[in-house]
């Protein structure tokens, strides 16, 4: 049997490996606390589940959905963007439901990239931007994100010939894994750069609704001219605790939305209609559940920051997203430090290096773990005297 070269180029998806280690530890009787994957532990709000129960009884929902979704679903997305961001979208040409943002992000590569093309991809980052690029046979030009720049790309450092050749730029704010946020000025600089170089600007806004201390993320679609140069990916996963239902959306430039529709029409058949009904319920119903979630995460955020600091790790208090991005103490690599936490404390974190080489030196702790688990994990971290690195 011969598999494709692209399969051989894949690094193990970080969470598959972590899940395996957790399962092995638990099987051996360990009481593992996990700050690993970003997957809300809080259930999907009941009105959204109730809508699924009703929708599942309706036979037309048992059949193939349309790739571009139910018209009511596209309208619900447009309405939500208007209510939340004041952004006007044409539901029929500027909105496309997705089987989760991940699906759309992966497929977007096929809309823009041919073999040998260049995509500007941040590092550290959610892995799918680079993987999609590789699947399309194109090359990622890495935009390193540094703490000193607030984890924003250094656009001036991109060589002019790379900028001219690049076809897409990926951005993600509020950011996974660093929790950094972007201001309107930051987005405007990226837009100017992309416009000048005829680059499609693709923004992943999966965490726009998880903001703390009153912080409200901006949508790139609020910016003048955004619809001329790009699209924004969004997801119900993190906002409404719906990771398991697989639903998200892309909005923005009509030609780009159409291109993504064409790719999807040939590879998948859209989002199950009963799940679209859940999403309509979520987007158009009362939004208190979002505030409740944020309150829960904010307590966890403060608790984890306190624990990391008292163990001697440097951390910034994030203004948004579900992650604490902590600097590992001197002498350890990210992977070694994550390994020590696992072996000494039965605490799971993700090494920053899983998100690219510029994530080296950090670990990511996800806040999607029940409060009592957070408390237990934090107590273990606080009571720990960080061992000396091996050989250091
Ligand atoms: C979780 C996450 C997504 C995935 O969203 P789905 O809608 O569940 O596919 C996309 N982008 C980032 C940065 C994420 O962390």
Image: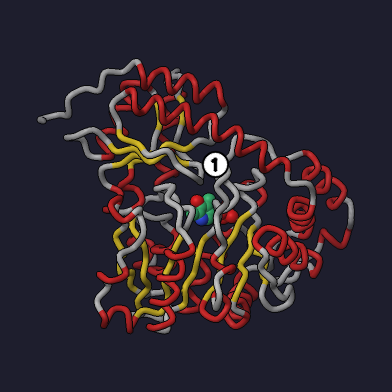
Corner quadrant of residue 117:
bottom left
How far from the left and from the top, in percent, is residue 390?
15, 29
> Residue 135 appears at what percent x and percent y?
42, 69
Q: Nearer the viewer, residue 48 or 107?
A: 48
Q: Going 42% across and 18% down the picture, which residue do you hit?
A: 379
Query: Closest to the observer: 64 or 102?
Result: 102
Look at the numbered disc 1 and give the secondary structure of its residue: loop
**Where is the N terminus found, in terms of image quarters?**
bottom left
Q: Position of residue 160 (x, y in %)?
A: 26, 81
Q: Quadrant of the C terminus?
A: top left
Residue located at (51% from left, 79% from top): 229
As drawn, is 389 to the left or to the right of 218?
Answer: left
Residue beneath label 1, please? Answer: 212
139 displayed left or right of 74 = left
Looking at the image, which residue is at 34% across and 67% down?
Answer: 5
Seen in the picture, residue 286 relative to 200 is either above or below; the reply is above
Say if 373 sits above or below 170 in the image: above
Q: Nearer the viewer, residue 21 or 324?
A: 324
């Amino acid at each position: 049997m011969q598999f494709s070269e692209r399969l051989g180029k894949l690094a193990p998806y970080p969470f598959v490996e972590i899940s395996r280690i957790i399962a092995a530890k638990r099987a051996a009787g360990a009481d593992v606390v996990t700050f690993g994957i970003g997957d809300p532990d809080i259930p999907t709000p009941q009105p959204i589940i109730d809508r699924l129960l009703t929708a599942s009884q309706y036979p037309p929902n048992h059949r193939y959905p349309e790739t571009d979704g139910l018209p009511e679903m596209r309208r619900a997305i447009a309405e939500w963007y208007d209510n939340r961001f004041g952004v006007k979208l044409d539901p029929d040409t500027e909105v496309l439901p997705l089987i989760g943002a991940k699906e759309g992000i992966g497929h977007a590569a096929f809309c823009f990239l041919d073999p040998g093309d260049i995509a500007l991809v941040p590092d550290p980052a959610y892995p799918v931007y680079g993987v999609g690029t590789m699947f399309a046979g194109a090359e990622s030009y890495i935009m390193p994100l540094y703490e000193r720049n607030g984890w924003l790309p250094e656009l001036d450092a991109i060589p002019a010939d790379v900028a001219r050749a690049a076809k897409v730029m990926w951005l993600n704010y509020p950011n996974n894994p660093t929790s950094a946020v972007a201001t309107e000025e930051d987005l405007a600089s990226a837009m100017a750069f992309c416009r000048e170089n005829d680059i499609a600007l693709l923004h992943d806004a999966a965490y726009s609704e998880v903001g703390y201390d009153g912080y409200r993320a901006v949508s790139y679609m609020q910016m003048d001219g955004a619809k001329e140069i790009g699209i924004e990916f969004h997801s119900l996963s993190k906002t409404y605790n719906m990771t398991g239902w697989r639903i998200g959306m892309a909005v923005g430039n009509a030609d780009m939305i159409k291109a993504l529709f064409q790719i999807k029409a040939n590879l998948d058949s859209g989002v199950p209609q009963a799940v679209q009904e859940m999403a309509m319920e979520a987007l158009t119903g009362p939004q208190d559940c979002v505030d409740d979630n944020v309150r829960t995460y904010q307590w966890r955020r403060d608790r984890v920051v306190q624990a990391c600091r008292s163990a001697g790790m440097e951390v910034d208090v994030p203004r948004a997203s579900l992650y604490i991005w902590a600097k590992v103490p001197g002498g350890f690599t990210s992977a070694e430090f994550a390994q020590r936490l696992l072996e000494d404390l039965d605490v799971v974190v993700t090494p920053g290096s899983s998100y690219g080489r510029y994530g080296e030196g950090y670990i990511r702790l996800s806040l999607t773990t029940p409060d009592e688990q957070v408390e237990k994990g934090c107590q273990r971290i606080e009571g720990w005297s960080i061992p000396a690195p091996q050989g250091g």
